[in-house]
Image: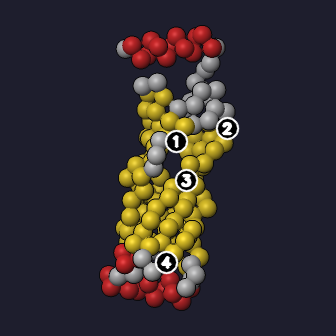
Amino acid sequence: MKRLLLFVLVCSLVSCSVRETPEFVTVKNIKVLKSDKKNLTLKGDALFKNPNIIGGKLQADGIKVLVNGNEVAEVSSEVFNVPSEKEFTIPLLVDIPVNKVFTDKNLGSLLGSILTKKMEVKYIGKINYKILGFSHSYTVDETETVKIKL
């Protein structure tokens, strides 16, 4: 109750209006940042639009990463400060052990990836938004085909 009262008071003092939560648009630009014999580092950008004059905080926690249909890792991020009245991205970085991608279990998809030099990467999970005691979760379910260098 105190938080709600504080929120109303702050908005009244600065004549702000929180019209809506920031809009989650998509995850884009999924790519391999680096690869070596032990790890692949993938990066995707979660794109948001914030129409409000106040920000808030976003955190990606427990977003699963699937490569060619097989779960290989989870993304967790630092808390990200949301800018007011802007379009912005938060980076979704993940290190994936190569032995999780290239296993006997997914031999068929591995051969397909080697021949086409592409792999299908899927981010699935939730990104949480918080502001003055209010919270909202965004569902992430995005797939992109990523070029790989062998």
Find out whether the residues at labels 3 and 1 contact each other: C-beta distance under 8 Å. Answer: no
Q: Earlier in the sequence, mark 3 or mark 2?
A: 2
Decide: is 103 above or below 97: below
Q: Is any atom of residue 13 visible in this view?
A: yes
Q: Earlier in the sequence, mark 1 or mark 4?
A: 4
Q: Say what secondary structure mark 1 lies in.
A: strand
Q: Earlier in the sequence, mark 2 or mark 4?
A: 4
The Cα–Cα distance between marks 3 and 1, rounded to whole angstroms, is: 9 Å
Residue shown at the point (47%, 41%) measured from the top left: 79
Q: Quadrant of the C terminus?
A: bottom right
Q: Quadrant of residue 95?
A: bottom left
From the image, tell me which residue sits under label 3: 91
Q: Say what secondary structure mark 4 lies in.
A: loop
Q: What is the number of the mark on residue 36?
A: 4
From the image, tell me which residue sits under label 2: 86
Mark 4 crowd level (few <14, some 14–19, many ≥20, 10 Å Cα): few
Image coords of residue 34 (percent x, y): 55, 71
Image coords of residue 82 (percent x, y): 57, 37
The Cα–Cα distance between marks 1 and 2, rounded to whole angstroms, is: 14 Å
From the image, tell me which residue sits under label 1: 80
Q: Nearer the viewer, residue 112 or 63?
A: 63
Find out whether the residues at labels 3 and 4 contact each other: C-beta distance under 8 Å. Answer: no
The Cα–Cα distance between marks 3 and 4, rounded to whole angstroms, is: 21 Å
